[in-house]
Image (tube, grey):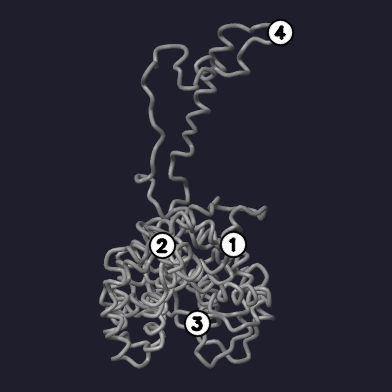
Amino acid sequence: MQKREQGKSGGAAGGNAAPPPKRGRPFGSTAASVASASAADSVAPSTLLGPSLQIHNSFSVEQNNKRIVLALQSGLKSELTWALNTLTLLSFKEKDDMRKDACLAKIPGLLDALLQIIDDWRDIALPKELRKGQRTRTLGANSVVTGFGNEYEALGSVALLPQSGLGSGSAAEISGQKNTSKRRRSEWWLDEDGLFNLDDEGRAEKQQCAVAASNIIRNFSFMPENEIAMAQHRHCLETVFQCIEDHIVEDEELVTNAIETIVNLAPLLDLRIFSSPKPSYIKITEKRAVQAIMGMLGSQVKAWHCAAAEFLGRMIINPDNEPLLLPFVPQIYKRLVDILSLQAFDAQAAAIGALYNLVDVNMDCRLKLASERWAVDRILKVIKTPHPVPEVCRKAAMIIEHLASDPQNRTSLLAYENAFAEILFSDGRHSDTFARILFELTSKPNNKIAAARGIWGM
């Protein structure tokens, strides 16, 4: 529970506390990045987003903030390219570089303008041929009342019914109005592609602009001064979670930017914002948001399920988010145990970090994880291998200590008594932890023996 208090104090301080370490994008995490890296020399300059741009040291965001926002809102290719390239360079910073000019608070309307670019691409991302059309009902087509709720359509409309004092009207007028209403209900103009439909090249440009905008938002999320504003921006969170929800059909780079953005915002994120009175744009609910993350956790892409595991581990610390995550806890720890079987060290680190927070704040997870098949074996394997990061090994040992502290887990954990003793005498870094584990398992009596001693004076 100490981690929760630290998280609350950090959020109440307005971001003054040391933020948790940010995660960077692993090279080659998506197929698009690998392809672009291998074919960087062969790509024609006309297919790129725009020319390379260097910002002079005297460039001031405060003097050009209105121009940047207006350029993003204009939709003009040259202005949009200049604004995206400028913001990409301003939002990217090295380890020792502090870009105070890239604070979202200094550029009003910038985040909304970037989100609008992503929304414009998502509006045309799915082809019309793949959209689910309206179901045609033929049952009872020859009858006046079909039984499917179309009684008023069959009779013309409500306005066509006779009204008292106004007369019923002639049959010709009613039939003419009926035909007019039928033509209006067809809405044929919405079935056309329109005069300004984009070709393949235009769609590709829209997609590149959306990816560039998502990359800028991702870069902004690494800056502590932007975290609070982004974590409380409902439109930003809805757009990000919708991209994650559609990760199967959406652009891989866009999904990767979205998942890394919410991982950076996770310590300050409250899922109850989706039911708040703030204006909603996409109607994302708390359940849909958690289901989107669960879909990423089950993905086969390493960068995605690692980020999802890290996100869930950070979200569970917040007590306000725990009731929303509880229905998914059995699925979460089972998938995390599966991730521990992977040979990738970063995947093991993400799973151990999430399990460490889960068993610390959730009693149900402590009880069921100990009886989960291969769970303790794989956690011990991380310690014995050992993992190259000592902190991961320490958290793995602490997970077993949390499991041993619950009396109901002692029977299942006693089967690993020899393995615990082996680590106790062979690894000095974790000897204290496993000494406490063995003490919990062997020296403390269980509840039945303690009750018998209390009754019979044993």
Mark 1 and mark 4 in contact (Cβ < 8 Å)? Answer: no
Upstream in sequence: badge 2 or badge 3: 3
Residue 164 circle label:
4
Upstream in sequence: badge 3 or badge 4: 3
Q: Label 1 vs label 2: CA separation?
A: 37 Å
Q: Amino acid at mark 3?
A: Pro
Q: Which residue is mark 3?
A: 21
Upstream in sequence: badge 1 or badge 3: 3
Q: Is residue 454 at all visible to an observer of this figure?
A: yes
Identify which residue, 85 or 443, lies in the foreground. 443
Query: Where does the N terminus fall, quadrant-wise?
Result: bottom right
Q: Label 3 vs label 4: CA separation?
A: 73 Å
| Residue at x 62%, y 87% (from the top left corner) | 59
Where is 100 relative to 280, above or below? Answer: below
Mark 1: few/some/many CA within 10 Å (<14, 14-19, 20+)? some
Q: Label 2 vs label 3: CA separation?
A: 46 Å
Can you tell which quarter of the image residue 114 is in? bottom right
Mark 2 and mark 4 in contact (Cβ < 8 Å)? Answer: no
Query: Where does the C terminus fall, quadrant-wise?
Result: bottom left
